[in-house]
Image (cartoon, grey):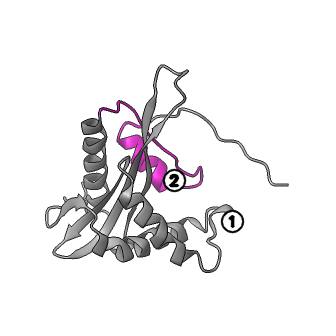
Amino acid sequence: MPPKADDGRVRSAQPRDLDRVAALWTAITRHHEDLDPLFIMRPGAEGELRELLAALYRDRDAEILVYDDAGDLPGMCIVRIDHAPPIMHEVERAEITDLGVRSSERRRGIASALVEAALEWVRASGVERVEVQVACGNHEGQGFWRARGFEDLMDVLHKRL
């Protein structure tokens, strides 16, 4: 059993955290680059991450969570609420769009603590369903989410032209 993340705590990101969250988000993206060329960041995109995070920070339907370990931020999670067209019975759902822990801090329960906090935020928002998207080749990620009760919903098919 992995050690518990008991040295730190999950909290909402603050504006002062956004540069460090952007660095974590970049690392998460770089981690996926080996899975498929689709995930390769274009040059200069790191600067745009900060702007995206600032917009998410201001969005009432989004939450940026960080794992704070005595001022160090080894993990982050972004969750947001999406609104569906009113023709559907379910008019809103949540999506955990990004989750990552610095590679040197993995297997300490940090990602689990972040996900639990994200799910609590979703519950408090009154939303009843959460989705995640996981790359097919990301076996570690597939196992992580399935171990937390996430199941197949839909296959996303694509074709390179």
Rendered location of residue 41, percent (x, y): 61, 71
Magenta-span inclusion, residue 93:
no
Name the residue located 44 percent from the left edge and 32 percent from the top edge: 92
- Left or right position of 43 against 151: right
Residue nearer the viewer, 122 or 138: 122
Q: Is residue 82 above or below residue 43?
A: above
Q: Is residue 105 visible?
A: no
Name the residue located 67 percent from the left edge and 62 percent from the top edge: 38
- Left or right position of 6 against 135: left
Which residue matches tag 1? 37
Residue nearer the viewer, 93 or 29: 93
Which residue matches tag 2? 139
Q: Residue 36's image quarter?
A: bottom right
**Mark 2: amino acid:** His
Name the residue located 53 percent from the left edge and 67 percent from the top edge: 29
State the extent of the magenta-drawn residues as a range. 126-150
Residue nearer the viewer, 79 or 102: 79
Rendered location of residue 99, percent (x, y): 40, 58
- SS category of the residue bearing label 2: helix
| CB within 8 Å, label 2 to label 1 | no
**Mark 1: amino acid:** Pro
Rendered location of residue 48, percent (x, y): 53, 72
- Left or right position of 82 against 137: left
Name the residue located 15 percent from the left edge and 75 percent from the top edge: 70
Which comes before the other along the chain, label 2 or label 1?
A: 1
